[in-house]
Image (cartoon, rainbow, N blue to C red):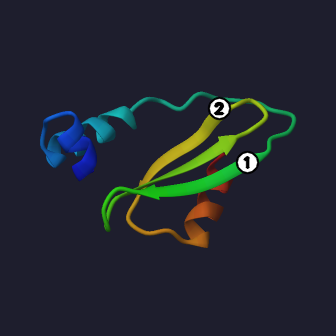
Amino acid sequence: MQELAQRFSCSRKTIARYLKQAQLREPEQRHFSSVNIIMDTTYFGRKFGVMVLYDSISRQALSVSEVKSESNALYRQAIREL
């Protein structure tokens, strides 16, 4: 987050606030016959990460969530929520 704050000349709190606001949208209901899921977590510092589940067939992010740590349990939970 510090890199984003420096790049856009604002505070880390401002970046965190914008990211939290972006997650407030109601998720779309999607119905696919098949998906190929790519899962990854990118960290911005030691305590803030973004976990993304991406469908390489439709080229859409199926799930985006804020995480503090990466675990198989979080990936399983994200898949169940699809």
Q: Which residue is mark 2?
A: 60
Whole-angstrom CA distance, mark 2 to mark 1, is 10 Å
Task: Classify mark 2: residues with Cα within 10 Å, few (<14), some (14-19) or many (20+).
Answer: few
Q: Which residue is mark 1?
A: 37
Q: Is residue 49 left or right of residue 6?
A: right
20 versus 31 height, above or below:
below
Q: Quadrant where the C terminus lies?
A: top right
Helix or strand or loop: what does disc 2 sit on? strand
Q: Position of residue 15 (x, y in %)?
A: 23, 41
Q: Position of residue 63 (x, y in %)?
A: 57, 43
- Identify the residue shown where x is 42% and y is 29%: 25
Q: Is residue 41 left or right of residue 78?
A: left
Q: Is residue 58 left or right of residue 12?
A: right
Front-lying residue, 27 or 43: 43
20 versus 40 height, above or below:
above
Q: Position of residue 5 (x, y in %)?
A: 20, 43
Pick whichever of labels 2 and 1 is earlier in the sequence. Answer: 1
Front-lying residue, 79 or 5: 5
Q: Amino acid at mark 2?
A: Gln
Task: Classify mark 1: residues with Cα within 10 Å, few (<14), some (14-19) or many (20+).
Answer: some
- Identify the residue shown where x is 80% and y is 32%: 32
Instruction: Tell me the quarter of the picture where residue 62 sits.
Output: top right
- Identify the residue shown where x is 36% and y is 33%: 22
